Image (spheres, grey):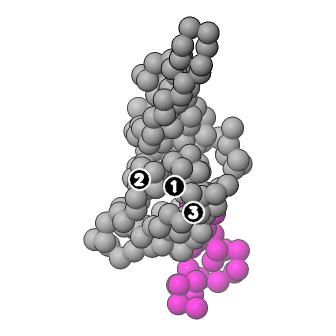
Amino acid sequence: MSHLQAKPIKVNEGELKEKVVAINRVAKVVKGGRRFSFSAIVVVGDGNGIVGYGLGKANEVTDAITKGIEDAKKNLFQIPLLKKTVPHEQLGKFSGGFVLVKPAAPGTGLIAGGAMRAVLESAGIHDVLAKSKGSSNPHNVVKATIDALVKMRAPHSVAFQRGISVAKVFNG
């Protein structure tokens, strides 16, 4: 299901917290009238750099949420964090959804809307400036936000790759 290459991450089931981003009621027209079912997009995270999303569909809302949580636990991603914010500015894209994620000073808070806020809270990011451009569809916004977070690079990995000190990465 995931458009990104997820690395299997082992996490204790009890540590993950779930957030329901959106529930959609879908109607199928049959001979006797309309048959309703529900789809739920769910974000899970441990609040310490691990986040995932999933989609569940069922005839009952609770079943759809449960299926979404199970799916989300299969799509987990490791996010680099730096002092409870993101290491650098990053654009994320999925289909019609574009998001911009910027680091912020401590105490700024989580400035993001709707579906982005759920993903960033689950990942454990406390100070960030984020803007959703393009589609406001929660499915696309969640996937674009995770795309932006997965593209992030930790300062120590950049320093190792360039063969310089971490201080030089920040100070040029």
- Which tag, 3 or 2, sits closer to the chain's start? 2
Q: Is residue 172 above or below residue 120?
A: below
Neighbours of disc 3 within 10 Å: few (<14), some (14-19), many (20+): some
Query: Do tag 1 and tag 2 residues touch (Cβ < 8 Å)?
Result: yes
Q: CA distance from mark 3 to mark 2?
A: 14 Å
Q: Residue at x 61, y 14 (%)?
A: 30
Stretch of the chain drawn in magenta = 149-172
- Which tag, 1 or 2, sits closer to the chain's start? 2
Q: Is residue 126 above or below residue 61?
A: below
Estimate the x, y position of residue 49 in percent, counting from the top left: 48, 53
Left or right side of 124 for 136: right
- Mark 1: secondary structure: loop
Q: Which residue is mark 3?
A: 134
Estimate the x, y position of residue 94 in percent, counting from the top left: 65, 56
Q: CA distance from mark 1 to mark 2?
A: 9 Å
Q: Is residue 152 rendered magenta in the image?
A: yes
Q: Is residue 166 above or below residue 92?
A: below
Q: CA distance from mark 3 to mark 1?
A: 7 Å
Q: Residue at x 59, y 69 (%)?
A: 91
- Mark 2: secondary structure: helix
Q: Which residue is mark 2?
A: 114
